[in-house]
């Protein structure tokens, strides 16, 4: 492996993102790994030449990882301390890719591991990419507006009068995830591993899908894993439904792409996997929010892949399948019957119907109170973390659902407007709009727009699910949106840049 010590350029990274080559070039002549520092252009590389052996035999490489030499320490110093050396930069990019794949694997299972890996990835990206690359990324509204929302949440802590600082910081923590958006976007402009990341996420969710069916079918397994809801071994059914619906739609799209390429075995396999996720949603457990975003997502799939009168036939077939699933699924029937009963519960101020909490009635009450909070501070809101205190003041002396105290009005627009007023809503809708524009070609159906299509589906799902929830501030849904939009958006920009380079 020869490090040429040439001036820093993003050309190798751009070529890697385009799939033109895999830098750095690796060669092992005569079974040995050679590191050539003869062409180093700085004293730093001369110093590194003294620290790292010129020829590393297989036995020495074994010592690297057994701690019997200083080679590992020297290698870490080399990778971390030589920002402008293309070989070291390429190694760091590979490490980041590995960490992102690991993050995709653990994301459905652990919040702690997700947070820790995301922080480590941001640190590695900060080491790898220069300030100018980050500044260039901020020129895009799609990258700048998430950070603007984060900045507004930070500044908003200073006008949350009377709110304890722990509550202000807790509310800020829900928005802090957006600090990772720009680094991920910039990184995936310089790599081509988005497909591998999605494959890892799909594999992890397939394991979760199998476990979900086992928990649903076996009471013994349910007791072992401590499932809190039927067919939901981890977290909650809201998170699981959001992930399974997104994956099911993406798999339908991949199957349609395979049909276009006349790869029928691959299309059949993808369609079968998609059907398994849909079956889980229909017969095991589903969030009622999915009743809003799933029809729209399926309609978008139809618009992209089917034209003319055939689209009407496909939509009719989807409706028939939905009615059939409802007829055969006690899960869907129970969810719909609950919804109808909860509307009456709102009018009678009732917290429970047949021993089950009236989530729909609670939302209506939260929205009613939230509108009053916004009216009292329409421009800048009440400040970061003020929501819970406002609800507590309104709940004093009340009974039933009117006495409920929450820090989440279960609507993204209201959650933003209460804390940061109309200014916050402008930033929120600007961010959603910028991300929709980033992926606008996804609906065109042209060849090579599958990345844009996946990004468009993620944005549409989040916007629609945020009608009944504050999903940007929720852990799983917020991170899912951030990961998909940042990774796919960065990869899409890399593809566009490759196209421009090939044409020039």
Image: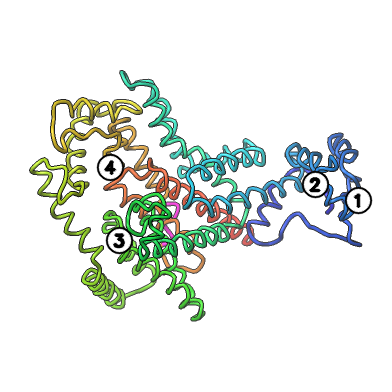
The residue labelled by disc 3 is 296
| Residue 261 in picture, x, y percent from top left | 51, 77
The residue mark sitting in front, 2 or 3, is 2
Give how far apart the Cα atoms at labels 1 and 4 are.
61 Å
Q: Of all residues shown, which one is farthest toward the top?
A: 162
Q: Are marks 2 and 1 in contact (CB under 8 Å)?
A: no
The residue labelled by disc 1 is 55
Q: Of all residues shown, which one is farthest toward the left?
A: 348
Classified by dominant secondary structure, the portion drawn in magenta counts as: helix
Q: What's the residue at 82%, 44% (across, down)?
A: 5
Q: Dot 4 surroundings within 10 Å: few (below 14), some, or many (20 or more)?
A: many
Give how far apart the Cα atoms at labels 3 and 1 are.
60 Å
Q: Nearer the viewer, residue 419 or 165?
A: 165
The residue labelled by disc 2 is 66
Q: What's the residue at 82%, 47% (across, down)?
A: 64
Q: Is residue 3 left or right of residue 492?
A: right
Mark identifier at residue 410? 4
| Residue 334 in picture, x, y percent from top left | 21, 60
2 or 3: tag closer to the N-terminus: 2
The residue mark sitting in front, 4 or 3, is 4
2 or 1: tag closer to the N-terminus: 1
Secondary element under disc 1, as helix, strand or loop, is strand
Q: Are marks 4 and 2 in contact (CB under 8 Å)?
A: no
Secondary element under disc 3, as helix, strand or loop, is helix
4 or 2: tag closer to the N-terminus: 2
Q: Nearer the viewer, residue 138 or 464?
A: 464
Displayed quadrant of residue 296: bottom left
Q: What's the residue at 67%, 51% (across, down)?
A: 94
Q: Which residues are magenta?
A: 437-442
């Amino acid at each position: 492996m020869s490090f040429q010590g040439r001036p820093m350029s993003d050309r190798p990274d751009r070529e890697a993102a385009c799939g033109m080559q895999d830098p750095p070039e690796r060669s092992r002549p005569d079974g040995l790994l050679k590191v050539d520092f003869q062409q180093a252009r700085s004293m730093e590389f001369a110093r590194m030449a003294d620290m790292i052996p010129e020829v590393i035999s297989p036995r020495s490489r074994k010592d690297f990882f057994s701690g019997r030499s200083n080679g590992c320490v020297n290698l870490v110093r080399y990778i971390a301390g030589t920002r402008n050396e293309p070989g070291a930069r390429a190694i760091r990019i590979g490490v980041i890719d590995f960490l992102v794949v690991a993050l995709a694997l653990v994301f459905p299972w652990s919040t702690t591991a997700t947070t820790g890996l995301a922080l480590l990835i941001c640190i590695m990206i900060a080491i790898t990419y220069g300030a100018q690359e980050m500044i260039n990324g901020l020129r895009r509204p799609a990258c700048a507006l998430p950070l603007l929302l984060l900045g507004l949440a930070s500044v908003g802590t200073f006008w949350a009068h009377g709110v304890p600082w722990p509550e202000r910081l807790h509310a800020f923590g829900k928005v802090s995830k957006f600090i990772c958006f720009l680094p991920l976007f910039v990184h995936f402009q310089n790599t081509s591993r988005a497909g591998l990341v999605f494959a890892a996420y799909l594999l992890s969710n397939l394991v979760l899908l199998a476990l979900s069916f086992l928990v649903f079918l076996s009471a013994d397994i349910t007791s072992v894993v401590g499932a809190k809801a039927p067919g939901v071994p981890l977290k909650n059914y809201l998170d699981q439904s959001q992930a399974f619906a997104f994956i099911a739609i993406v798999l339908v799209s991949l199957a349609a792409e395979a049909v276009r390429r006349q790869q029928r075995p691959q299309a059949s396999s993808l369609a079968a996997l998609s059907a398994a996720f849909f079956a889980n949603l229909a017969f095991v457990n589903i969030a009622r929010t999915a009743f809003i975003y799933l029809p729209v997502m399926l309609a978008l799939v139809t618009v992209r892949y089917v034209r003319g009168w055939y689209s009407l036939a496909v939509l009719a077939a989807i409706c028939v399948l939905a009615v059939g699933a409802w007829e055969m699924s006690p899960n869907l029937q129970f969810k719909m019957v609950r919804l109808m009963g909860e509307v009456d519960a709102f009018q009678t101020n009732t917290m429970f119907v047949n021993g089950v909490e009236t989530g729909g009635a609670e939302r209506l009450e939260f929205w009613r109170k939230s509108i009053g909070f916004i009216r009292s501070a329409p421009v800048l809101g009440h400040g970061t973390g003020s929501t819970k205190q406002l609800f507590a003041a309104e709940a004093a002396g009340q009974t039933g659902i009117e006495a409920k105290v929450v820090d989440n009005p279960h609507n993204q627009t209201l959650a933003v407007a209460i804390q940061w007023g109309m200014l916050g809503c402008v930033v929120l809708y600007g961010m959603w709009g910028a991300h929709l524009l980033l992926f606008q070609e996804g609906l065109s159906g042209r060849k090579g727009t599958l990345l844009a299509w996946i990004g468009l589906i993620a944005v549409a799902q989040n916007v629609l699910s945020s009608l009944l929830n504050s999903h940007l501030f929720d852990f799983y849904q917020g991170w899912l949106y951030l990961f998909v939009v940042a990774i796919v958006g960065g990869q899409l920009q890399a593809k566009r840049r490759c196209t421009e380079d090939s044409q020039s």
